[in-house]
Image (cartoon, rainbow, N blue to C red):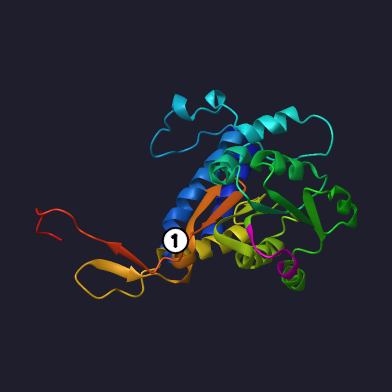
Amino acid sequence: MDTQALSSANIARRAAQRVLGVFPERHRRGALSFIRMTLNSRLALLGMKAYTRTPLRPASAEHSEDRRLPGRLEQYFDAHTEGYGIWKWRHYFDAYERHFSRFVGKRVRILEIGIYSGGSLAMWRDYFGSDSEIYGVDIEEACRAYADECVGIFIGDQADRKFWRDLQQQLGTVDIVIDDGGHEPHQQMITLEESLRLLRPGGVYVCEDIHGTLNPFMSYINGFADGLNGADKRLDGEELGYKANAIQSAVHSIHHYPYLVVIEMRAGPMRELRAPRHGTQWQPFL
């Protein structure tokens, strides 16, 4: 092991110790596991042996990326070699299909923030069908060129709450919001907060390109997600149950993917969460 490798490893370990101090005590065990994994990756790059408590199992064939068949969106992307540009991380397409497929062929309204070179607007139209309404938002005036009889364009700053209020008056509600805009955490936070006003019941919010560990927007999302686990107001009666808080009432689920977050809204409000018992034979220790 050379001196440079040892020095780099020591620097990485000291950095990990400093980062660990940022986490509250109750989160440090999980944070430590993540930091150990990150450090081991760094050591591997340096040609050093990484420490793991248990060996990693090889991926099963059913989860192998090589055996995965591309869905319709990915097929469209691969076939699109000319014309308006589309720039997406390839692993996004599986998530799109998982969360968007129920809207295909319906009268769905899609709002994408970040038009850039216009190609994804046509991709959404092709995927969702002729009954879909596609809208794009960008800060660049040049993006007005992508408006046509099937696509509406709005020019404005996604970090400007006044722009969002004006947009809501003009546009009304939508079924899907896709944030592929400026990718700065403050922009993403405002866009999420304002998008929740636009989304219809059962709608879907997507934020793309959340890059970097300890990303401020991801910390914001994790704080938001904590509300799904709220158990503050116990319901009366013998059956275990809690009154749903505001997030539990409105949000069905939050999904994390590499660089991507998806929030699915409930089709209707949830009033309470209950855990009924079924059966007649129970152990006495609980």
- Could you tell me which residue is drawn at 66 percent across and 29 percent down? 75
Q: Which stretch did the figure color magenta?
A: 168-174
Query: Can the viewer see residue 210 in this picture?
Result: no
Q: Is residue 256 left or right of residue 110?
A: left
Quadrant of the rendering where the C terminus is positioned: bottom left
Check disc 1: other Cα within 10 Å, few if <14, some if 14-19, many if 20+: few
Q: Quadrant of residue 170?
A: bottom right
Q: Nearer the viewer, residue 35 or 259?
A: 259
**Residue 173 location, x and y as percent?**
65, 63
> Image point 55% across, 28% down: which residue?
65
* Residue 263, picture quadrant: bottom right
- Residue 281: % across, % down: 9, 53
The answer to whether residue 259 is magenta is: no
Of the 4 image quadrants, the one containing the N terminus is top right
Task: Determine whether the residue tagged by mark 1 lies in a helix, strand or loop.
Answer: helix
Q: What residue lies at 76% left-to-right and 71% top-to-bottom?
A: 166
Q: Residue 202 location, x and y as percent?
A: 52, 57
**Percent x, y of residue 195:** 64, 63
Amino acid type of the residue that numbered disc 1 sits on in the rendered structure: His
Q: Which residue is mark 1?
A: 27
Q: Is residue 109 visible?
A: yes
Q: Is residue 154 left or right of residue 43?
A: right
169 inside magenta stretch = yes
Residue 247 vs 113, above or below: the answer is below
Q: Is residue 32 above or below residue 216?
A: above
Image label count: 1
Seen from the viewer's position, the closer of residues 253 and 130 is 130
Q: Is residue 62 above or below residue 130?
A: above
Compared across the picture, whether 83 is left or right of 167 comes to: right
